[in-house]
Amino acid sequence: MASADDIRSTVSKYLDAVGGGTSADVAALYADDATLEDPVGTEPLVGREAIEKFYSALDAVQVKTELLNVRVAGDTAAFHFRVVTDTGEQTITVEPIDVMTFDDQARITSMRAVWSQDDISFS
């Protein structure tokens, strides 16, 4: 099992990649057969290729992320963070809580994002 420090490091790399990297950078943090459910209740995506395609929407906008809180237990991390996306026409802010599981190399094996349309603000 990955250490809590290694898991926290992957969470940090994830937020850095979402906030300033490419969809390929984000997808590289996932295991090959990982799953992604964002938000919870949508059809889960399976595999790194599908996950990279999901994150590709971020490649064309400016995104800032801020970690607000993280908890690690065993192979799982739950973290609350802020995402501010500037599309050029508007700014979108959401504060999801992500729950991720990790393999022995601290690669993400599953991600479930807890948020809804009610949690989004526009300016």
Image (cartoon, helix red, strand yellow):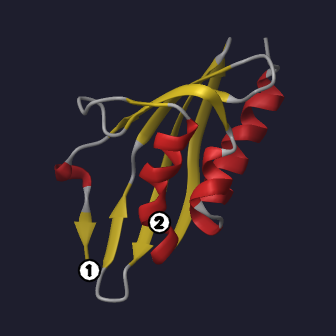
With respect to residue 37, does 14 lie above or below? below
- In percent of the image, x 79 and y 16: which residue is there? 104
The amino acid type, in three-letter code, at marker 2 is: Leu
Alpha-carbon span between mark 1 and mark 2:
18 Å
Locate the N terminus and report the quarter of the image it occupies. top right
- In percent of the image, x 82 and y 30: which residue is there? 5
Per the image, label 2 sits on a secondary structure element best described as helix
Residue carrying label 1: 123
Per the image, label 1 sits on a secondary structure element best described as loop
The amino acid type, in three-letter code, at marker 1 is: Ser
Residues at marks 1 and 2 touching, judged by CB atoms closer than 8 Å: no
Q: Given the current orientation, which residue lies at the most extreme bottom position?
A: 88
Residue 23 point in image, percent of width and height: 57, 58
Residue 89 point in image, percent of width and height: 29, 88
With respect to residue 84, does 106 lie above or below? above
Mark 2: few/some/many CA within 10 Å (<14, 14-19, 20+):
some
Residue 109 in view, yes or no: no
